Image (spheres, rainbow, N blue to C red):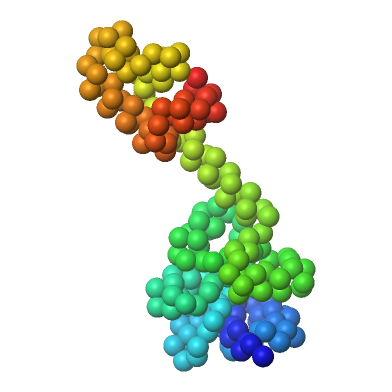
Amino acid sequence: MMKPYNILIVEDDPKQAELLRMLLSGQNRFKVTGTAESYEEAEAVLASDKIDLCIVDIDLRGKKTGIDVVKHVSEKYPFTLVLVHTIHADSSVLFDAIKAGAGGYVLKGLSPMDFINSVGRICDGDVPISPMIARKILASFKQNETVFSEKLSEREIELLKMSDEGYQHKQIAQMLNLSTHTVYTHFKNIYQKLHVNNKTSAISKAKKLSYL
């Protein structure tokens, strides 16, 4: 029989913490080793017990938040998993938690079965994320992609248009009265800004973003 995962619940609402403890204690693969209502309490439990998984709320008692707990675990206990369990769906909190080292991010309000499944998934090496949170992550990537493209200058867009029309670098240089080296430098900058490594991909991405 596999050794159960030792779990620390970091939650400032005693009723919520007890509910989570009861849910997880009913599963053979989980063992709730302790609970904590603040960063300091969590720090003490982590220092005294071998914890395999921390389930962390963002709002805690005291000045430090769940983000501080996530960062502490990530830095001092790199083999301990962290699942954020919170009401916060805002992007700023989400990305702060991910940057701090969270391995999963689920919103409160899950059904008991979905919550247990999320805990099981992170223990199995998966990344449990609530659907709303996943949509925010995807939206952020799309937004970043647009930001990258906005850095293109008018000259760079002009060069891409000419390249799309079939003109080679030397021809573009002659037509625009530029040195070939300058044209190559422009394209190198374009590739970096669009996160591509060739002309075909640059043109394709520029079209996707409605620049061509």
Residue at 64%, 77% (x, y): give it. Answer: 13
Percent of width and height locating residue 159: 37, 18
Percent of width and height locating residue 158: 39, 16
In the displayed structure, 113 sits above or below 157; it is below
In the displayed structure, 163 sits above or below 40; it is above
Q: In screen coordinates, is 161 left or right of 189? A: right
Residue at 42%, 36% (x, y): give it. Answer: 196
Percent of width and height locating residue 22: 73, 84
Residue at 32%, 31% (x, y): give it. Answer: 189
Pick whichever, 163 or 96, lies toward us: 163
Residue 32: quadrant of the picture: bottom right
The quadrant of the image that shows the N terminus is bottom right
How many discs mark residues in the rendered view?
Answer: 0
Pick whichever, 113 or 59, lies toward us: 113
Residue at 40%, 31% (x, y): give it. Answer: 198
Q: Is residue 35 visible?
A: no
Residue 116: quadrant of the picture: bottom right
Percent of width and height locating residue 27: 73, 84
Pick whichever, 84 or 187, lies toward us: 187
Residue 169: quadrant of the picture: top left
Q: Is residue 80 visible?
A: yes
Q: In screen coordinates, is 172 left or right of 200? A: left
